[in-house]
Amino acid sequence: MFLSQRDIQVFIMGYSVAAGATGRLLFGYDSFGNVCGKKNSPVEGAPLSGQDMTQKKHVFFMNSCNLEVKDVRLSSTVLCVSSCPEEQLDTLEEVQLFANTNGSFLCVYNLNSFNYTQIPNADLLCPRLPVPPSKSFPLFNRCIPQTPECYSLFASVLINDVDSFHRILSGIMSGRDTVLGLCILAFALSLAMMFTFRFITTLLVHIFIALIVLGLLFVCSVLWWLYYDYTNDLSIELDTERENMKCLLGFAIVSTVITAVLLILIYVLRKRIKLTVELLQVTNKAIRSSPFLLFQPLWTFAILIFFWVLWVAVLLSLGTAGAAQVVEGGQVEYKPLSGIRYMWWYHLIGLIWTSEFILACQQMAVAGTVVTCYFNRNKSDPPDRPILSSLSVLFCYHQGTVVKGSFLITVVRIPRAVLMYVYNTLKEKDGALSRCMSQCCCCCFWCLDKCLRHLNQNAYTTTAINGTDFCTSAKDALKLLSKNSSHFTSVNCFGDFIIFLGKVLVVCFTVFGGLMAFNYHRVLQVWAVPLLLVAFFAYLVAHSFLSVFETVLDALFLCFAVDLETNDGSSEKPYFMDQEFLNFVKRINKLNTRAQRNKNSLTSEEGTELRPL
């Protein structure tokens, strides 16, 4: 199953390389099919194509003040020039002088600069006068007019009428340095958070929770402040700015709801902090027996980075895949190839499935390492190279288990994404019932996604213990957890919650940095989608680093459950767990027993008071 999916992904990759032209998106191209800044191949039927544009890196619009779109085509002729005119040119003589002085020819290529003022129809082959002063902007290297009248007309046509997919891609590419910097920030924050959990103490947990609360409140405040700033900005005329404003409102509402829920949970579970610290210390002791587990996320992160870069490169190639067609006047336009948008959707599915597969491989490797160290009688003599042993078993015997687990997550995420799209489509209409139903379905799929992730993790651990297939392991894990849930469910959940807060902290600081960075380019850049991608990437990186603690924690308790099933603590059948872990479990049982007694006594007293005379 995964092999066929991989084959299709390889086919899409090869097809995008063969049919796509990322250079057209990155560098821009003229009306005759020439990519600016590149040496081009000729297009049959277009005499001005196939020119060497190595020295001409800027895109110039001959009628930038009166751009129109007719049949998805710009009415203005587009040229590649070596430099943009930074001063206004009022006559053809000034255009000729600019060409002779700067070597930048603003008229059609087959017209020599000497003939700019000689032939009678030169005004049809040269830019419309006056030529406004312009400046190259890092969005496709276009010459952007600087006069207010021309700028507003130019931007409203060029940006608003461009395909939304290409507009999003242009936002990603124009902010690529910012996106890269934010990804590095997320990586550094994830590393810092991992080492924080490695040396956890009660004081550190309180400081950590205080930072979480302040970070959530701060990000919410910044989002609402930016939305207020957008709504009071009277100069907003472009669709990009309106889209950014809508996305800001969505971000602000979602972050406010998440903040409220997390603050309530933190307040309710505040009394469990001491037990959680002990739990994380027990987890750290298990990691201490195989310290290289902390470096396990590094190769996961490296593979994810490589895959994401490759995925974006293929996406850019798919976005520019088109066949050159010669139209009137020897000009060239590119028609999208049939069926290309279906490849975009499959490419998105490949992103989700492959990312989940990589993360699942890490979970399986960590679970196998914990199982090897736990079921070792001689604790003073740990097994040799448990990580390498776990990896070799994974790739030799259990790839099918990981593929099935990651496929289940992908199957749940796809309808969730479709329902979110339907909700956003219906949001502009009056179908309140439809919107409510789609939101309820999204919530159900989210809950199902979380349950499946927990089930997958326990199935991977059971596979590492018994060597069984995915379905058998999932069934056995459910039986074990249902029998022994009273021992550790509440503390384990709060431990996972603390680790989840660490991921939230990484995302909060990364999103705040992205808001501050992207807000400076709010006009010619759709930065809402790049910011969403950065937030997703930050959570993915934080999850790959901190999930080591989650995986070790869940694997330890499942090993404990198996230990209770097969051993009784006697001399004939001693437990595999060490004394510290056993004492911790006994403390949890005492607290649970005391809480149950208090609850029963309270129920009995209430029943006595309500008993009739």
Image (cartoon, helix red, strand yellow):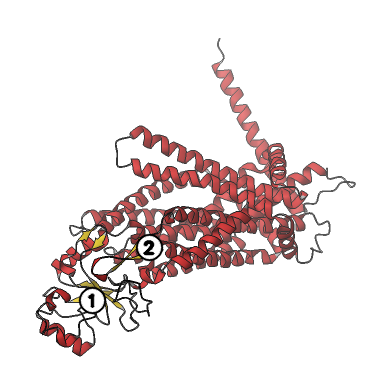
The residue closer to the viewer here, 173 or 337, is 337
Q: Residues within 10 Å of mark 2 (few under 14, many from 20)?
A: many
- Please determine whether, in this image, residue 224 is positioned above or below residue 128: above
At x 77%, y 49%, the residue is: 466
Mark 2 or mark 1: whose residue is earlier in sequence: 1
Can you tell which quarter of the image residue 271 is in? top right
Q: Is residue 340 left or right of residue 131?
A: right
Q: Describe the element under mark 2 as helix, strand or loop.
A: helix
In the rendered image, the residue lying farthest to the top is: 613
The residue closer to the viewer here, 375 or 326, is 326
The residue closer to the viewer here, 556 or 444, is 444
Is there a contact, CB below 8 Å, between mark 2 and mark 1?
A: no
- Please determine whether, in this image, residue 544 is positioned above or below residue 487: below
Label 2, label 1: how far apart the Cα atoms are: 22 Å
The type of residue carrying mark 1 is Lys
- Name the residue beneath numbered marker 2: 169
Q: Position of residue 267 (x, y in %)?
A: 48, 45
Which mark is on residue 285?
Answer: none
At x 65%, y 53%, the residue is: 402
Q: Specify the quadrant that holds the C terminus.
A: top right
Q: How many marks?
A: 2
Q: Answer yes or no: is residue 279 visible.
A: no
Which mark is on residue 135?
Answer: 1
In the rendered image, the residue lying farthest to the bottom is: 101
- Please determine whether, in this image, residue 96 is positioned above or below residue 584: below
Q: Answer yes or no: is residue 408 visible.
A: yes
